[in-house]
Amino acid sequence: MPVQKKEARPASRGGRVRVPAFVQSQRGVKNWKEATGWLDWRGIEDIECITPDQAGVARGKMMPSKKFTSNTSLALPSAVFMTTISGGYPEDGNGFTYPEDDGDLKLLPDLSTLSVVPWESDPTAQVICDLVHQDGRSVEFTPRNLLRRVVAAYDERGLKPVVAPEIEFYLVRKNPDPDYPLTPPVGRSGRAIAGGQGYSIAGVNEFDELIDDIYHFSEAQGLEIDTLIHEEGAGQLEINLRHGDPIELADQVFLFKRTIREAALKHETYATFMAKPIQGQPGSAMHIHQSVIDKKTGKNIFSNGDGGETDAFRYFIGGMQRHIPNALVMLAPYVNSYRRLTPSASAPVNTKWGYDNRTTAFRVPRSDPVARRVENRVPSSDANPYLALAASLACGLIGIINKEQCEAPVGTSVNEDEIELPRGLLEAVDLFEGDEPLRDMLGSAFVSTYAAIKKAEFETFMEVISPWEREYLLLNV
């Protein structure tokens, strides 16, 4: 429910109360003084200080707002960012060492992300935090810092990356028992949702009230949805965000995932960002549109003066063709992710590029030269948005730095050809650890930590006996 606002305190003129603009801002303030006024005007009682872990899960602490604004020191154990999705910890080795003291990392609130938590019954706000060591050094292996590192690499070269993510997800019936398959939800018609509803307005209207809550929750947090559509899958939706700064857009995806899940739960439904939640249905992607701006001129470096393509444009694509397979574990981070990447499906399994060709990994949409961009269609929606953006932008920048030539564009369907991407999680981890230019761009601390986590997750998965094994091996071998 909406938070209640206190009476504004600023001086009045002619009997009318003057409210500072920063107080009315739905998202973000400039400093702690403004934060105090912003919280007080809304009557905020509690603050959620959150940060994404390696899986993109919100971790952090909640506290009274008065304590938040009293220069309180916040910290989280470093182990939080070395944890697998199932709550375990990886083994030491290959450059990774679990810290014996499990020392604390300091949380630094980014006040530009301050917003309300609209689904809470008590007046509550949230703020995304960065992490530093006790001596103030940035923590290399945390997701938000990693994306900052990649953006800084662009900045050092006078460049500014611009991105626009598209996030697909499924609405499914509540399913508390993981042994049972997920099923499509029942819409307002009273019937279970069927597939084949791509771009169907009627398909969207099946969930009118839930979608209204997504819009209301998003507006209250200052999050802007560009468009929302029904995708091909049964109960599969897609939200497109407006283009902008990578860190700001990663923050938005991080918060959108929370928002969509909460809106769905309010309507007794699950929202899932699993890459392949339902057998026989399409997978869910997180497509990333990317362009690069020259900071001095403000112009898109993918287009030259006469509107033609530049060398930088082709080098960017060349870098993605060369390095995305090695970075795939950041774009397809779980065993389930590779169930989406199959031939003859809407998800690409190649490293080809083409103009407006949705069967390629890297699609160049039709656009004016000023808006020329490259869409990376490989990432799945289960990817941590900070890591997915960092990986995709890093591969493109490596291409520009090393002047890596791209292959010729393709104009035919190429998604039934031989698979050019890693076929499973362990293969993806091996390629990830062996790419030296990628390691230099991302930092060894992150690469070794992330690889160790993924290996541990795979071993946990291998402990589970699947229905397929019981079906075909129980009485036949």
Image (cartoon, grey):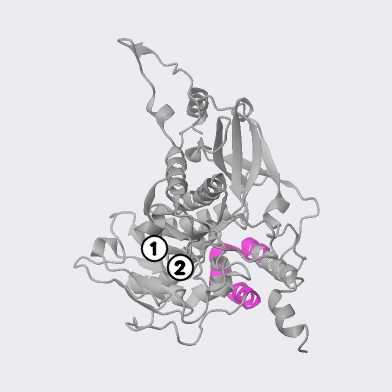
Determine which residue is flagged by label 2: 195
Q: Residues within 10 Å of mark 1 (few under 14, many from 20)?
A: many
Front residue of 379/196: it is: 196
The reply to whether residue 403 is in sight is no
Left or right? Give the position of 175 relative to 275: right
Q: Residue at x 57, y 79 (%)?
A: 422
**Disc 1 secondary structure class:** strand
Residue 253 in the image: state x and y as whole percent: 49, 52
Q: Which residue is mark 1?
A: 289
Label 2 packing within 10 angstroms: few (<14), some (14-19), many (20+): some
**Rendered image: mark on residue 298:** none
Q: Residue furthest left?
A: 306
Residue farthest along the front direction in this orientation? 190
Q: Give the mark count.
A: 2
Report the predominant secondary structure element of the magenta stretch: helix
- Residue 296 placement (x, y as % from top left): 31, 54
Q: Is residue 67 above or below residue 368?
A: above
Residue 440 magenta-highlighted? yes
Q: Is residue 176 magenta?
A: no
Camera sees residue 354: yes
Judged by depth in the image, the label closer to the viewer, 1 or 2, is: 2
Q: Percent from the top left, x then y, of residue 472?
A: 71, 84
Part of the protein shown in magenta: 425-449
Q: Quadrant of residue 302?
A: bottom left
Q: Provide the secondary structure element on which disc 2 rests.
A: loop
Q: Report the quarter where the C terminus lies.
A: bottom right
Indicate the amino acid at tag 2: Gly
Q: Earlier in the sequence, mark 1 or mark 2?
A: 2
Residue 11 vs 86, above or below: the answer is: above
Q: Amino acid at mark 1?
A: His
